[in-house]
């Protein structure tokens, strides 16, 4: 029977005479359900319905959504947004629906991309950070690039400008932030372009007849070239600007120390090389 309605019942019986009796009765009103929210995250809300009578409670998201048995966790929602939910109470025949109730997801935490150029000369190295805080944080060397855990380092980089990205995600929603560009330079081919190479390594004496030049050859490597000066040429040591020694060095901590890896100082001047 419909709820909250009056009905008349008629009873007729006989004991030799026909007698009719009538009575009026009213069904109870099916309670309109109320809605409550709990366990809110950046991507989900648990929705529950309650009512003082009825046999089953269901809830749904949006006017055109599907009903689910209460309580129900609605997942894969946008973060920091408000959504309308509805509840239904039923006794198996009659339904009582609630008005729309709004519930909101929480927002993903703030995000700030930062990068450090560890080696500015190719093959270079850049470290990218997504900062600290909630959510799963990831970084990539470029927009759309492969994502790695926050604080990842990218090595063996070719010369060029890179624009890293930082991300924070809850597995469904993702926020991103772009880092400032980071440049990796090509190794110099010009003697005298020291880059990060220390100014005064252990080197042969800069005598009247020879001297030396330095250039950075890679992210951590330097070359030192010993050559004949004008005076050396005039004294017959060798041809003007002739290279008489070439050495490879590795930049040490803070680019202040050197470690000789190869090279030779030829001719009679070899005695002057430590």
Image (spheres, rainbow, N blue to C red):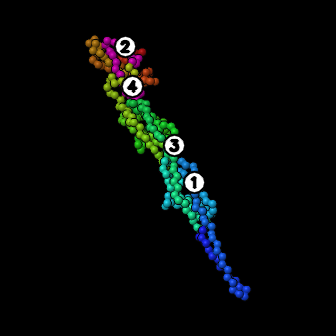
Upstream in sequence: badge 2 or badge 3 = 3
The C terminus - image quarter? top left
With respect to residue 160, does 42 lie above or below?
A: below
The residue shown at (58%, 60%) is 33
Upstream in sequence: badge 4 or badge 2 = 4
The residue shown at (40%, 21%) is 198
What label sits on residue 36 in the rendered view?
1
Q: Magenta segment: does it hold 219? A: yes
Local crowd size for mark 1, using a 10 Å CA cut-off: few (<14), some (14–19), many (≥20): some
Badge 2 marks a residue whose secondary structure is loop
Is residue 116 visible in this depiction of the protein? yes
Task: Estimate the x, y position of residue 173 in percent, counting from the top left.
Answer: 48, 48
Q: Which residue is mark 3?
A: 135
Where, by quadrant of the figure, is residue 210 drawn? top left
What is the C-alpha distance between the residues marked 1 and 3?
A: 26 Å
The residue shown at (57%, 54%) is 36
Where, by quadrant of the figure, is residue 92 drawn? bottom right
Task: Estimate the x, y position of residue 224 in percent, counting from the top left.
Answer: 37, 21
Query: Foreground mark, 4 or 2?
Result: 4
């Amino acid at each position: 029977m419909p709820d909250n309605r009056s009905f008349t019942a008629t009873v007729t019986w006989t004991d030799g005479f026909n007698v009719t009796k009538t009575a009026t009765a009213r069904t109870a009103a099916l309670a309109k359900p109320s809605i409550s929210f709990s366990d809110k995250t950046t991507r989900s809300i648990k929705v529950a319905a309650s009512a003082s009578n009825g046999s089953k409670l269901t809830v749904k998201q949006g006017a055109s959504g599907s009903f689910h048995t209460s309580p129900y966790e609605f997942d894969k929602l946008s973060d920091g947004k408000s959504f309308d939910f509805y509840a239904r109470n039923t006794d198996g025949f009659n339904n009582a629906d609630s008005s729309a109730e709004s519930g909101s997801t929480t927002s993903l935490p703030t995000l700030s991309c930062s990068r450090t150029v560890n080696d500015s000369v190719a093959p270079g190295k850049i470290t990218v950070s997504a900062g600290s805080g909630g959510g799963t944080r990831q970084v990539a060397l470029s927009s759309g690039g492969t994502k790695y855990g926050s604080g990842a380092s990218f090595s063996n980089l070719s010369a060029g400008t890179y624009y890293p990205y930082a991300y924070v995600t809850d597995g469904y929603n993702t926020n991103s932030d772009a880092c400032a560009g980071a440049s990796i330079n090509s190794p110099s081919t010009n003697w005298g372009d020291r880059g990060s190479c220390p100014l005064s390594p252990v080197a042969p004496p800069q005598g009247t007849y020879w001297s030396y030049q330095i250039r950075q050859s890679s992210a951590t490597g330097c070359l030192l070239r010993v050559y004949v000066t004008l005076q050396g040429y005039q004294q017959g040591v060798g041809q003007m600007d002739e290279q008489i020694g070439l050495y490879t060095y590795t930049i040490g901590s803070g680019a202040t120390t050197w470690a000789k890896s190869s090279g030779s100082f030829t001719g009679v001047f070899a005695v002057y090389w430590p």
